[in-house]
Amino acid sequence: MPTVLLIRHGDNDYAKKQRLAGRLPGIHLNEKGRAQAEELARALREVPLKAVYSSPLERAVETAQPIAEAHGLKVIKRAGLIETDQGMWEGKSVKSLRRSKEWKSVHLRPSRFHHPGGESMLHQQMRQVEEIEAICALHKAKDVIACVGHGDPIKLVIAHLIGLPLDHFQRLMLDTASVSTLLMKGEWGTMLLNLNWTVKGFGTKKNFDILNFLAGGP
């Protein structure tokens, strides 16, 4: 199975103001987010990507586009990579939600949490993992692919694939425009090669040579 770069989308005004964007339409990258996407595309230009997949939401597609263009590829939108259905929480500020009982539950007992009017964390994890596995099934073991998505979904995928209990997934941290890399080994399990890798932390060619070696690239 391939090496998978799980990329969180770039900055946007909802993330900047600590509001939950969820699946709300029309949320685009802000100036910082667009700069992040361009920097990420330049940083990944030597990684031999075979495909770039993305959540269909604007902020994810806008992050994926420069990466795909740098490799002469088109962004492939996958509905299964979409953000959590946050139901009644969409558009609300983190500050206001912190006063609710549910906020404590989603951080301490996420395996039992269901977004009011939306999606449970357990269902979301199953959906995302199935989607990543379906995408991987389209590729050869030596391929390197990128999947651009959202914070919690990416953390949930990583938690499942490395055997971290769902109730501990919030212990993982992901910055905007970060890359977390999984070496998928099928029945032999999954290796987490890096977590929350940002341009400032991996801007040298040496780091990409490691990725190329693991993926069987040039």
Image: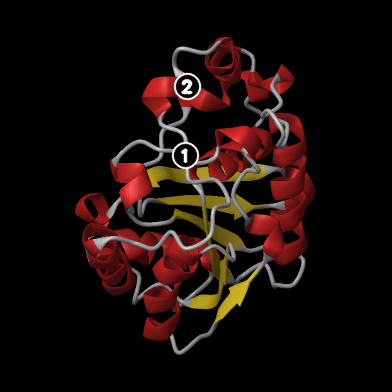
Query: Which residue corresponds to the image point at 40% horizontal and 74% vertical from the top-left?
Result: 67
Q: Which mark is residue 20?
A: 1
Quadrant containing the C terminus is bottom left
Quadrant containing the N terminus is bottom right
- Residue extending farthest bottom: 72
Q: Quadrant of residue 138?
A: bottom right
- Identity, as a three-letter code, of the amino acid under mark 1: Leu
Q: CA distance from mark 2 to mark 1?
A: 10 Å
In the rendered image of this protein, does residue 54 appear above or below residue 177? Answer: below
Q: Which residue is labeled 2 in the image?
A: 97
SS label for mark 2: helix
**Residue 61: % across, % down:** 48, 69
SS label for mark 1: loop
Q: Which mark is residue 116?
A: none
Q: Is residue 137 left or right of residue 105?
A: right
Query: Which residue corresponds to the image point at 27% horizontal and 71% vertical from the top-left?
Result: 38
Q: Quadrant of residue 211?
A: bottom left
**Residue 86: % across, % down:** 62, 38
Report crowding for label 2: few under 14, some 14 to 19, many 20 or more residues within 10 A (C-alpha): some
**Residue 21: % across, % down:** 48, 46
